[in-house]
Amino acid sequence: MNIGVFCALLSALLFGISTPFAKLLVGAIAPLMLAGLLYFGSGIGLLFWFAVRQMSASTVAASQSARLANLEKADWPWLAAAVMAGGVAGPALLMLGLSVTAASTASLLLNLEGVFTAALAWFVFKENFDRRIFLGMLCIVVAGALLSWPSSIGTGIAWGTLAIIAACLCWAIDNNLTRKISASDAVQIAGIKGLVAGSINLGIALAMGNSFPQATRVLAAGLVGFAGYGLSLVLFVIALRHLGTARTGAYFSVAPFVGAVIAILFLGDAPTTLFWFAAALMALGIALHLTEHHAHPHLHEPMQHTHSHTHDEHHQHQHDFAWNGEEPHVHDHPHIALSHDHPHFPDIHHRH
């Protein structure tokens, strides 16, 4: 299995598992405060991990494989835009929409994130896709909608619905912008996102009069956030690096199904007919993606970037330092123009 597929599915698994646990905390913690604690927990945990790795890398400086592909100057504008869209505007619009929209309606509308993510990737950022990938994405999105289909749909207020739709668009923009910097260190990217989003959500929650819950609940929310938001986002960024945005978004869309299975197995929820129909559609959509075979003659334009790599057919370059033969390793390296034909995904080397 492609490492990107594995990371995307594991990312969805962690996020899906975290959802039922987050729901258990909703009754004890105000929603916006909980969102802030989940994000902040992920940011604190990941940046601690990042700092430990940085210190470890500095103590083994002679080992080229210990280097990290940290964010570079050109990456920061993309990261800032992604954080503003997904970490600031998205949560704020969602909370605004939820204040006047029934939860049943909101759960259906949130499936639009996958639709918007794929649409932007395909039609704005020109990521390649074919009929199989489109049908697979359609099956997964419809399955997600069926999984969240309520017995009755609240009408809410029109602008509240529009706010939730706008939040989904913000997260789709975030996903596509993050792909631009996915070659850089995933832990650093996810940690910064978590800290910024967490700080802003906590600030809004406190300004609205919410107070911090008991320390044990803060710790529980932080741990759930670290696993379900932090580690999940790290894996999501790695998947972006290997699969591109739309395919990563499609695999990640199985997260609600994972959450539903956990609720059925451990929280006493009973499976419905719609659940089994959604499961079949979800399986079909994933199967269509897993059996993709995209191959054609293609040209690699000259480029230069930094990321962890081995000397495969795409990395035939000389070193301007004494290389000790360790692989994979990290350094700034050029790619010369190369034309060849082989199966590939829209990864960081195949954005044509």
Image (cartoon, grey):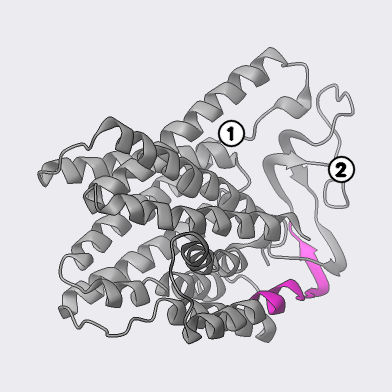
**Amino acid, disc 1:** Asn
* Image quarter of the N terminus: bottom right
Q: Secondary structure at mark 1?
A: loop
- Pick whichever, 85 or 234, lies toward us: 234
* Drawn side of residue 205 relative to residue 142, left or right: left
- Nearest the viewer among 214 and 129 is 214
- Which class describes the residues within 10 Å of circle 2: few (<14), some (14-19), or many (20+)? few
Outermost residue, left side: 209
Q: Alpha-carbon neighbours of circle 1 within 10 Å: few (<14), some, or many (≥20)?
A: some
**Residue 97 position in % (x across, y down):** 21, 67
Q: Which residues are magenta?
A: 286-301
- Which image quadrant is residue 325 in? top right
Picture residue at 54% right of the left edge, 64% below the top: 258
The location of residue 206, given as percent across then percent down, is: 15, 40
Counting from the top left corner in percent of width and height, residue 240 is at 61, 56
Q: Which residue is mark 1?
A: 70
Q: Can residue 330 be spotted in the picture?
A: yes
Report the Cα–Cα distance between label 1 and label 2: 20 Å
Q: Which residue is mark 2?
A: 311
- Which sits earlier in the primary sequence, circle 1 or circle 2? 1
